[in-house]
Image: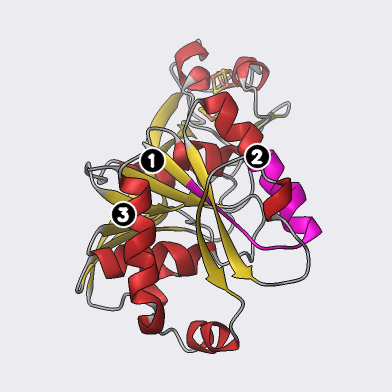
Amino acid sequence: MARIAVASGKGGTGKTTIAVNLAYFNRIDLFDLDVEEPNCHIFIRGKGKEEVVYRKVPSVDKSKCDYCGICRDVCEYHAIVVLKDAIYVMHELCHSCGACSYFCPKGAIEEVDRPIGRVVEVQSEIKLTYGVLNVGEATPIPVIKHVKRRIGRDAIIDCPPGVSCPMVESVRDCDYCILVCEPTPFSYHDLKLAMDALDKLGIPYGVLINKNGLPFNIEEKIDAEIVGRIPFDRKIAESYSKGELLHNYAETFREIYEVIKCR
Ligand code: SF4
Ligand code: SF4
């Protein structure tokens, strides 16, 4: 039993392909935490149950406000503008810390729910749960946290690309992380950043080389366990573009899972 994250320093390495096929061919629940651009549902299709995700933002009762500016001054995220006789809250910048309502001397601020996205659960041959962040929202973290609450002890987790906060929040609490890379200098550069991040977080990881066979020899440069290799195969790209699973590689994905579940 393990929570296995699938991440990549760089986008476009085939991370989602690996996560989806690993989950499907081993019959494990799949979670898509790439909430700004979820696409596991293109491969795992079915009727979904939805839940709206809210977060708290301030609402100002202007009849009580005297425009003292304290709320603006305590807001670390510059989400409040106070003028001589007007006040504006920019909800997209608010991080829901609650400081403004706590410090308002007039009790003029109430915290209200604002919808910022949704969590969708699809039951197909495997269960897929994914988050969707509403367009224009500044941070995906609250939606990622909502999806994470549903993760059990055995899961494959498709993480956001990169090594910034969304990726760190997604891999936190995982037992193991597969870093997907491709044999190119760009991918190698970003892979090193992802390895550094996981070293600092203390999360064990291995590297899966996708598009194996391209001329750049990434394998001799990596100081980490290689948990699998998926060949550079035009048919994989064709299947991906049609939203199809990689049935020809089912055994490869079962073998990869056998390797990592013992880690
Ligand atoms: S702290 Fe309260 S009273 Fe002062 S400007 Fe903000 S909302 Fe108005
Ligand atoms: S809740 Fe926090 S982040 Fe949001 S406006 Fe108030 S002080 Fe700023």
- Give the residue type at disc 1: Lys
- Name the N-terminal-most of marks 3 and 2: 2
Q: Which of labels 1 and 2 is toward the front?
A: 2
Cβ atoms under marks 3 and 2 closer than 8 Å: no
Q: Quadrant of residue 251?
A: bottom left
Q: Which of disc 1 and disc 3 is earlier in sequence?
A: 1
Disc on res. 223: 2
Q: Please identify the residue farthest to the front as the structure is shown.
A: 220
Residue 193 on image: x %, y %: 70, 40
Residue holding disc 3: 258
Q: Residue at x 34, y 75 (%)?
A: 250
Point 28% across, 42% down: residue: 2
- Quadrant location of the N terminus? top left
Residue 182: image quadrant is bottom right
Q: Is residue 111 above or below residue 211?
A: above
Calculate the distance from the C-alpha at mark 3 to the C-alpha at mark 1.
28 Å
Where's the C terminus, which quadrant?
top left
Task: Give the SS element for disc 3.
Answer: helix
Q: Which residues are magenta?
A: 178-194
Q: Marks 3 and 2, Cα distance to the nearest angstrom? A: 21 Å
Label 2 residue SS: loop
CA distance for labels 1 and 2: 32 Å
- Residue 24 vertical position relative to residue 208 in the rendered view, above or below: below
Q: State ligand 1's quadrant.
A: top right
Callout 2: CB less than 8 Å from ligand 2 = no
Amino acid type at circle 3 is: Glu
Which residue carries the number 1 mark?
145
Question: Where is 244 relative to 26, above or below?
Answer: below
Dot 2, crowdedness within 10 Å: few (<14), some or many (≥20)? few
x and y percentages locating residue 146 in the rendered image? 34, 44
